Amino acid sequence: MYSVETIALSRVFKRDGDRLVKALDNVSLAVRRGEIFGLLGPNGAGKTTLIRILATLLLPTSGEAYVEGYDVVREAGRVRELINVVSGGERSGYGIMTVRENLWYYTQLYGFSRREGWRRVDELVKLLGMEEFANVRLNRLSTGMIQKYNLARGLINDPRVLFLDEPTLGLDVEVARYIRGLIKRLIRDDPERTIFLTTHYMAEAEELCDRIAVIHRGRVVALGSPKELKALVSRQVVYKVEVKGLHNELEREIREAGLVSAVSLRSDIVSGVTVLRLVFRGEEEASRTIEWLVSKGYTILSASRAEPTLEDVFLKLVGARLVE
């Protein structure tokens, strides 16, 4: 039995009068128990819609979805006993209450006794390293501490399946690293737990996830381990090219010229350099593109071959960079 499974799952929304938007289109996934499963996709791809259906917060238009063998529609109550959801940037709780008071409140919603509730709160405060902030009001916490609190709240019922929707969104480097370490520890300490993760960060997906599904316009366009996904572009040539000046229009020009399989662009305002990442079918195509850039008057500061990354896979499949 899979921990999470969807079969031809679809969800349609009505927008702007009678216009229909298909947020999910025939999505079929099977997530194994004990794995960290990642879902990558641009804004509007259907990531949050899928999590809301799996968490029994939204009904599907068609298809089936199961969590730990229970149907999310017909057996929603059983599903809710086994899951929890944490979203990046959320503030669930009462601002004038302390961290401990808020967490204890949630233990009561889950049916803990008074004594067991406080014991669980103290366990989670220690697990999240929040002893110094346990008696601080929620409305006085930093964004990083709020997200640690959110994770503690999400672990109160010791969920078999934990849904994390962009859990490190907007966090500084140190707190994000701490959160990633905790996610790995949750699986290491309980190999029967499953974590279903959405993220905008390629490096985060590669570091954490056993397998990743790439979703685009409501459809799963690729599925596999990070190594398997990178193999999709292993036969292609990837270059990193630095161009003097800020040229935000250059990505569009390269696409229109039909020079590459995929291209992404980042402009560094501080250094005044445009960094291109280019995926080619072969070295000849790469040489031709470099010559084209020079002929258009661009000053190339460096051009070097690079190892394929998940970002290159995403570029190839979706045709755009996953905004970070």
Image (cartoon, grey):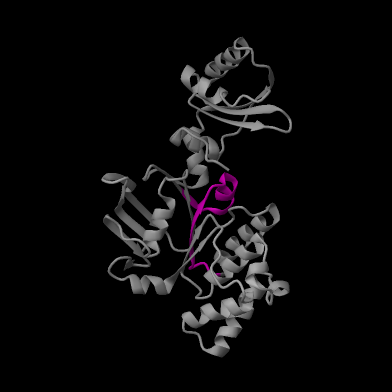
Quarter holding the C terminus is top right
**Residue pictured at 58% horizontal, 61% vertical:** 183
Residue 98 in the image: above or below residue 250: below
The answer to if 48 sits in the magenta stretch is no
Drawn side of residue 80 relative to residue 242, left or right: left
From the viewer's perspective, tell me whether residue 191 is left or right of residue 57: right
Q: Nearer the viewer, residue 121 or 161?
A: 121
Would you say residue 258 is visible in this rendering?
no
Give above or below for 58 relative to 309: below
Q: Nearer the viewer, residue 290 or 193?
A: 290
- Up the image or down, 161 lies above or below 299; here it is below
Q: Is residue 191 left or right of residue 305?
A: left
- The residue at 33%/56% (across/down) is 6
Q: Which residue reaches farthest top?
A: 295
Q: How many marks?
A: 0
Residue at 53% from the left image edge and 75% from the top image edge? 156
Question: Closest to the observer: 29 or 149?
Answer: 149
Q: Residue at x 51, y 39 (%)?
A: 230
Q: Is residue 75 visible?
A: yes
The quarter of the picture where residue 147 lies is bottom right
Left-right relation of 313 to 54? right
In the rendered image, residue 197 lying in the magenta stretch gets the answer yes
Q: Which residues are magenta?
A: 190-212
Please tell me in which quadrant of the rendered image residue 288 appears. top right
* Residue 57 position in % (x across, y down): 38, 64
**Residue 150: quadrant of the picture:** bottom right
Q: Position of residue 294 (x, y in %)?
A: 63, 12
